[in-house]
Image: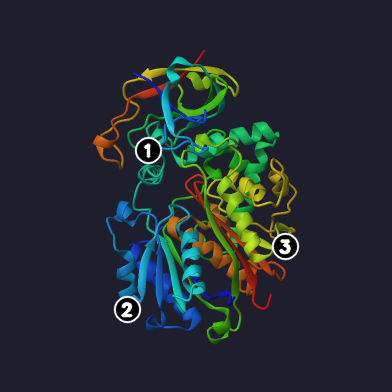
Amino acid sequence: MSMDAMRYTDGTVTYPPHPVGPEGGEPLETVDLSEYEATVVTWTVSTATPPGVRAPNALAIVEFDVEGESVRAIGGLVEGAEATVAIGDTVRPVHVDELRDPDAGIREPASQSWDGYRFEPV
Amino acid sequence: MDRVAVVGASMTQFGQRDEWILDLLTEAGQAAMADAGIAGPDVDHLYVSNMASGEFEGQTGVANALAQDLNAVPAYTARVDQTSSSGGAGVYQAWQSVASGASDLTLLVGGEKMTHRTTGESTDVIASLTHPAEYKHGVTLPSFAGLTARKYLTRYDAPRESLGKVAVKNHRNGVDNPNAQFRTEVDLETVLDSPVVADPLRLYDFCPVTDGSAALVFCSESVAREYADDYAVVSGVAGATDTHVVHERSDPTTMGGVVESGEAAFEMAGLAPGDVDVAELHDMFTILEFLQFEDLGFAEKGEGWRAVDEGRTARSGDLPINTSGGLKSKGHPLGASGVAQVHEVYEQLTGGAGPRQVDDPSVGLACNVGGFGNCVITTVLEEAGA
């Protein structure tokens, strides 16, 4: 299990990985963000969630510092974290076996059987 | 270069409609053709702006079906999909078809049929445009709005009430639009006390789910008077993208696609933000009106909220925004919205906006946003003779 970001030949890093970096660099190596802590850039609690998604669904955009490179990611907050979270808080990724019900919603079930990471305040 | 003119326009009643997509498109198409005094055989190109008739209704092939039902065969036709900015993309496509000389007369019809689905299902159809890295977390377009609104209010020390005032203003404008989905005023307290949808945003910060259609007729300015005594000119139009993965943007409160398309459209028109007299902005969420107001250059970053706070964007203000009621009150049938925005600007520039008419505008702008700023079309229009 890993939360793979991509480092490109020009030093930039993105999550998720892309075939080409934001400044045009070639993919060089993956970086496992689950080994890093991140800072909350902003957050929300979504109450009008689509089929197959938990309700309410607390979400955050967070920023990792990977050896001086800013890398942003979006993900859910662990249950209950919305009660205390604030912009600027430190969080860490924790693995979740199933992010949403793959049998619900518009996408093909086989295309959305996802595990992944949510963020837990440190 | 001979400029491209808009010589006819229409929109259907927006709201909950019994008709399916093809009938909605036909209704708007026929009305716009009647407005321009043309018939099906006059149409060289027919573009249909629509995001998801297949996903909403199981109906594909709408462009070809519409060509026959408007008696436009053998006109060239294509469906234009750019998610929520499909309508604006259709305007760009229609402009290109005439400007290039490929078409002498182009009909653009935008529409969407959504309300037969539950809100959750509609939300999911729209959310499916997001990158899997976003979608897998249950991210929706409203949740992006909540994330962005919190950042904006915090960073720029803007009062929560200023977002509510966007809803109050646009609902007030919608009262005077007979085709709007909502024709009721709301007060600030109602907005601020409505149920939370994506904290800090509440129900009245969001546009509704809507059925409807709108249409425009385009030709070269040199022949515009054959179709209409009064017309508008597309003097600038441009589209641009931003990162598809929203969180990868360095500034969550800036929409790069709005900045880029706005600058290009103004440059093409030879105009500046200060020249604009009336504008339709993509207020799918109240916060988006601030972001576009700033990213188009009407205010400095972080200062856009002051314009609504001071009444400058009201119909009586110096830059009226969303006189149609906006997506907020008029409704947001995805593929129709960008077309309906230009319809409102056209009505304003030709003096046909009735009780919504602002005082003698000569330059209007429409900004149509797809995804969460993932793709954007900005169109600048001028009154005939300008």
Which of the image's four quarters has the N terminus of chain B? bottom right
Give the Cα distance between marks 3 and 1. Answer: 42 Å
Q: Is residue A6 visible?
A: yes
Q: Is residue B149 left or right of residue B37?
A: right
Q: Closest to the observer: A100 or A116?
A: A116
Please state the horizontal and vertical placement of residue B174, each as a whole percent of the image: 58, 59
Residue extending farthest top? A122
Q: Is residue B268 left or right of residue B310?
A: left
Work out how far the residue at label 1 is from the one at label 2, CA to CA, in angstroms: 42 Å
- The residue singled out by tag 2 in the image is B74
The colour style of the image is rainbow
Rendered image quadrant of residue B156: top right
SS class of the residue under badge 1?
loop
Q: Is residue B231 left or right of residue B241?
A: right
Residue B187 can be seen, yes or no? no
Q: Which residue is mark 1?
A: A50
- Mark 1 burial class by Cα count in 10 Å: few <14, some 14-19, many 20+: many
Q: Quadrant of residue B383?
A: bottom right
Q: Earlier in the sequence, mark 3 or mark 2?
A: 2
Identify which amino acid the numbered label 2 is placed on: Pro
Q: Which residue is mark 3?
A: B275
Quadrant in the rendering for residue B231 = bottom right
> Of circles 1 and 2, which is in front?
2
